[in-house]
Image (cartoon, rainbow, N blue to C red):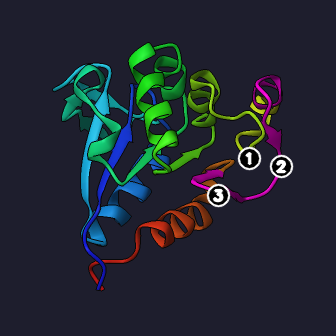
Amino acid sequence: MTEAKKVAFLLAKDFEDSEMVNPYEEMVKNGHETVIIGLEAQKELTGKQGTVTYTTHLGIKDAHAADYDAIIIPGGSSPGYLMYNEDVSRFVREADREGKTIAAICHGPQVLAAAGVLEGRTLTAFPGISSEIEAVGGKYLNREVVVDRNLVTSRVPEDEPAFIRETVERLGVNAW
């Protein structure tokens, strides 16, 4: 049995519902501690499909990557609200320097691009943002999941099983 890990979810409003719900529930099921980090603490955030709402635990200004074993960045429109925030970029750069698992799906890699951590890295994302990845020195592959060192990336909700599997594998399964 593996020791429980602490997992941060970077989240803003209009996230893709399933890209938050499914990885979040899997982390909880596996006994990992989950912390939802938003632009502000105690904010209610609703998914773009309107099926689920989460309340942030912590604001990004008070978050330190050293406190977490992994970061998960759901897609949808949420990354568009996070990517231009310097505290979010600092948090992601810090996590990347420390080799923490960073898992981003759909538009989530926009946050990685804005943080400047994609130079020379291979990843995937929602196909419509492939040029954004390449513009900052990343190599885009159109695959369900791509792992490059500490980065785990996927394209769309249909890729969630592979995305979750690769993320859980890096953390280790605790509960079962």
Q: Quadrant of the N terminus?
A: bottom left
Assess whether residue 140 is covered by the magenta stretch: yes
Q: Taking 9 as reference, is 7 above or below it?
A: below
Residue drawn at 41 percent across, 67 percent down: 171
Region of the chain picked out in magenta, as a range: 131-153
* Image x and y of residue 24, in percent: 35, 55
Q: Residue furthest front?
A: 97
Name the residue beneath numbered marker 1.
124
Q: What SS does tag 2 mark?
A: loop
Residue drawn at 37 percent across, 77 percent down: 173
Q: Would residue 88 appear left or right of 57 to someone viewing this image?
A: right
Q: Taking 63 as reference, is 68 above or below it?
A: below
* CA–CA distance in space, label 3 to label 1: 14 Å
Name the residue beneath numbered marker 2.
141
- Disc number lying in front (3 or 2): 2
Residue drawn at 44 percent across, 40 percent down: 95
Q: Amino acid at mark 3?
A: Glu
Residue 69 in sight in this render: yes
Q: Would residue 127 appear left or right of 89 to someone viewing this image?
A: right
Q: Quadrant of the C terminus?
A: bottom left
Which mark, by number, is residue 158?
3
* Image x and y of residue 25, in percent: 33, 61
The answer to which of 174 and 25 lies nearer the viewer is 174
